[in-house]
């Protein structure tokens, strides 16, 4: 099998309970032959015990015991499958409002989102919520699968009716492109294989759409962003004088010879060498873990960032951001939370909530005083020291951070810089 | 980057976060291919420095001799300190009681030895080779997985993990399990081993050995094997897809004696690799139950 040029696509799935999300994932895995025989046997056994006819595809994706017993997906579960063209990672997230935080988590690393809609019900509140969260988290490709087409006689009219309603919504919230696919997860129509049941649909089945999406975000104007994870100083043998900075390229491609500015100090230097896990290279692209050496003797440590001088991030003691509260304990006003952003840590206090978002109506409710788990809100956060950020829309890594409660060490909020 | 580069880069990023966030991390080294790959990734992550973590082997005492030889060579080649936690010692000290009967294994006993060793050595992070595709209870495991001061995992109360921000903050006595190759599948591991030409124990390659047919796979003959009345020892050409306790790790019939052939064979495989491990056959939630208690 020739695999060397295959790329990785991470996508997330969301749908209301019973829209057929588990069945769809089961179908993708099953039809792409990503399920082993012993797993099939196990699921057949369970299906029989639960009184299902044949194999209940949904059981392939039900993870933990409690969830299996309650028959719902609670947490984010990750699934994998590979086709001859691509490797896929699915972040399978629950759709109910009380799991907004899980949807946010699953969406944070995804490059495509599948939103499932029941053809009989059309757009419901959850559909809007899922689409909105995908958009909020900056997922570039949104695929709307109108499922259970078998239950509406594979009707073209019904498909276009539902699609039109959703299209109006996505345009209103500012999404430029959305793709619509009529499917039946149960029957396998247009999931992996193109169906004969809907000759009026001229597009590709879901899997080929997923295989052809551009997985990389191509923005060539991100500037150089290299958050330093740790300094490497072997201090022995041939590398006695070696000093390099380990990290991942989070902006534009870097080159030996590039001028860099070190934040927070602002000193200038040039990249003198790039080492890619043991091999010396002259450039490294976005997402690559490398070690960078610079020409001047500047003290650089974890939490610092190498950036381009003329396209630098904002450096400031406060930013406005959209937050998703993730903890069972509601936010405590005037509390110093630990801010973790790239490799840096600061303290932050949330000041002045701008608005809280009603995730059902998408209305901005002003004057909110408190926020609790699953709330999405806009606020200013003040830091105890300068933090280097980009707007989330431009860079998902340097534009995001989390809050940690110093009392419990739990991750309590996710934030996207505006 | 192709998908293997991306997985590699992600794992290296995670390993560097471990180094930066913890005081006393170790790599849990079983001698199996997944922990070998993690060790290889650690070598790359910190080059030209040495791997800044010791290797910790939880030794059931029921080993394939090849695994132990391989482990010793690897550790000394890398200049890594090798730590061993012994299940036999836990039994001798009365910390655990050996299972009885034909299907007895020391697998579950490893949990106690592991937790005791982590506590004794004040280890705050144990890096493992677990993958989310291995087993459904693992599908929800975080990269940075928190354990309370009893070493327990609470799958319903995990920290959210977003973007590439990992939160390893913990209180005294608690620890983390970190899984850098969470997003890899068995196939990815093999393709990577082939691409990087990573040395692995000879047991992974097809070879002739004495085995007995039990529970749907070929269990190797060893001094610990207790034969049932109608079981008999045969010579077969087999290889192992995972390496664990010799008493329960089943081989498959195979002619694959090169990496090339193994990759080809794995790509058309019809059963999960853990399907050949008796410990996972006990119940549908066997893995989840063990993981909650602190298993690997
Ligand atoms: N007729 C029909 N039923 C479906 C389809 N997809 C899912 N279902 C059924 O809808 C129910 C809910 O599906 P499930 O996948 O568990 O939904 P989830 O809650 O979104 O994961 C199950 O009874 C499925 O068999 C479909 O395309 N057509």
Image (spheres, helix red, strand yellow):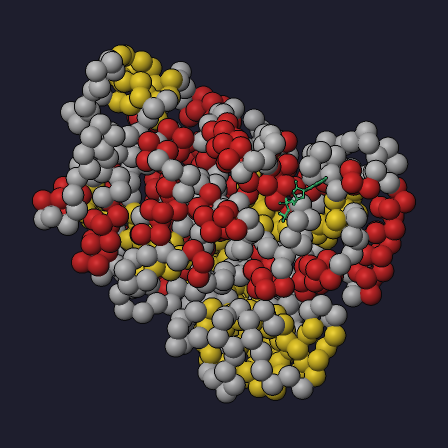
Total numbered labels placed on residues in the image? 0
**Residue at 64% over, 36% down:** A27
**Residue at 38% over, 37% down:** B283
Residue A142 pos. (x, y %): 72, 53
Position of A185 with respect to B260 (left or right) is right
Front position in the image: B147 or B28: B147
Residue B245 pos. (x, y %): 26, 34
Q: In which quarter of the image is residue A373?
A: bottom right
Residue A179, relative to residue B187: is it above or below? below
Regarding residue A200, the answer to whether it shows in the image is yes
Regarding residue A283, the answer to whether it shows in the image is no
Position of A356 with respect to B245 (left or right) is right
**Which residue in the rendered view is the most extreme toward the left?**
B92
Front position in the image: B66 or A155: A155
Position of A235 with respect to A218 (left or right) is left
Residue A85, relative to residue A107: is it above or below? above
Residue B52 pos. (x, y %): 30, 55
Q: Quadrant of residue B209?
A: top left
Q: Quadrant of the N terminus of chain A?
A: top right
The quarter of the image that holds ligand 1 is top right
Position of A142 with respect to B76 (left or right) is right
């Amino acid at each position: 099998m020739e695999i060397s040029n295959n790329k990785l696509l991470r996508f997330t799935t969301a749908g209301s309970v019973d829209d057929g999300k588990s069945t769809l994932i089961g179908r993708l895995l099953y039809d792409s032959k990503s399920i082993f025989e012993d797993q099939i046997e196990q699921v057949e056994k369970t299906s029989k015990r639960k009184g299902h006819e044949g194999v209940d595809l949904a059981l392939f994706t039900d993870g933990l015991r409690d969830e299996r017993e309650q028959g719902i997906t609670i947490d984010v579960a990750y699934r994998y499958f590979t086709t001859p063209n691509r490797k896929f990672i699915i972040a399978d997230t629950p759709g109910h409002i009380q799991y907004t935080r899980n949807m946010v988590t699953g969406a944070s690393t995804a490059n495509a989102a599948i939103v499932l809609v029941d053809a009989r019900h059309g757009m419901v509140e959850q559909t809007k919520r899922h689409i909105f969260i995908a958009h909020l988290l900056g997922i570039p490709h949104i695929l709307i699968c109108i499922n259970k087409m078998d239950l509406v006689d594979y009707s073209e009219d019904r498909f276009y009716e539902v699609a039109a309603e959703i299209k109006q919504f996505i345009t209103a919230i500012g999404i430029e492109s959305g793709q619509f696919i009529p499917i039946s997860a149960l029957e396998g129509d247009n999931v992996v294989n193109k169906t004969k049941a809907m000759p009026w649909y001229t597009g590709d089945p879901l899997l080929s759409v997923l295989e052809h999406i551009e997985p990389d975000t191509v923005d060539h104007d991100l500037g150089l962003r290299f958050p330093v994870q740790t300094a490497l100083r072997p201090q022995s043998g041939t590398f006695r004088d070696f000093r390099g900075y380990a990290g991942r390229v989070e902006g534009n491609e870097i080159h030996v010879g590039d001028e860099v500015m070190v934040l927070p100090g602002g000193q200038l230097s040039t990249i003198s060498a790039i080492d890619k896990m043991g091999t010396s290279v002259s450039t490294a692209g976005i997402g690559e873990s490398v070690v960078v050496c610079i020409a001047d003797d500047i003290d650089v440590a974890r939490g610092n960032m190498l950036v381009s001088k003329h396209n630098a991030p904002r450096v400031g003691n406060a930013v406005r951001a959209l937050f998703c509260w993730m903890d069972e304990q509601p936010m405590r006003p005037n509390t110093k939370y630990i801010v973790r952003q790239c490799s840096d840590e600061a303290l932050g206090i949330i000041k002045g909530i701008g608005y809280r978002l009603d995730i059902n109506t998408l209305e901005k409710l002003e004057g909110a005083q408190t926020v609790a788990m699953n709330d999405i809100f806009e606020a200013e956060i003040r830091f105890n020291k300068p933090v280097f950020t980009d707007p989330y829309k431009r860079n998902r890594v340097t534009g995001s951070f989390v809050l940690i409660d110093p009392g419990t060490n739990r991750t309590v909020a996710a934030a996207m810089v505006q | 980057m192709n998908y293997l580069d991306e997985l590699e880069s992600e794992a290296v990023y995670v390993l560097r976060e471990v180094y930066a966030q913890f005081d006393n991390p170790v790599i849990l080294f079983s001698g199996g291919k997944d922990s070998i790959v993690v060790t290889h990734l650690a070598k790359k992550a910190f080059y030209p420095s040495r791997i800044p973590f010791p290797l910790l082997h939880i030794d059931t005492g029921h080993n394939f001799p090849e695994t132990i030889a391989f482990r010793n060579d690897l550790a000394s080649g890398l200049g890594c300190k090798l730590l061993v936690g012994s299940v036999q010692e836990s039994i001798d000290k009365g910390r655990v009681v050996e299972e009885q009967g034909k299907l007895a294994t020391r697998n579950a006993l490893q949990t106690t030895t592991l937790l005791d060793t982590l506590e004794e050595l004040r280890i705050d992070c144990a890096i493992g080779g677990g993958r989310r595709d291995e087993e459904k209870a693992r599908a929800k495991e975080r990269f940075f997985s928190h354990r309370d001061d009893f070493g327990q995992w609470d799958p319903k109360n995990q920290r959210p993990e977003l973007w590439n921000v990992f939160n390893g903050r913990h209180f005294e006595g608690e620890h983390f399990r970190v899984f850098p190759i969470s997003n890899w599948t068995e196939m990815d591991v093999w393709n990577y081993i082939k691409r990087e030409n990573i040395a692995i124990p000879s047991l992974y390659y097809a070879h002739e050995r004495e085995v007995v047919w039990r529970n749907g796979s070929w269990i190797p003959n060893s001094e610990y094997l207790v034969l049932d009345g109608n079981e008999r020892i045969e010579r077969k050409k087999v290889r192992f897809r995972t390496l664990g306790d010799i008493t329960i790790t089943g081989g498959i019939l195979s002619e694959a004696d090169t990496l090339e052939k193994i990759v080809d064979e794995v790509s058309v495989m019809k059963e999960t690799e853990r399907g050949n491990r008796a410990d996972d056959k006990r119940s549908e939630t066997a893995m989840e139950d063990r993981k909650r208690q602190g298993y690997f």
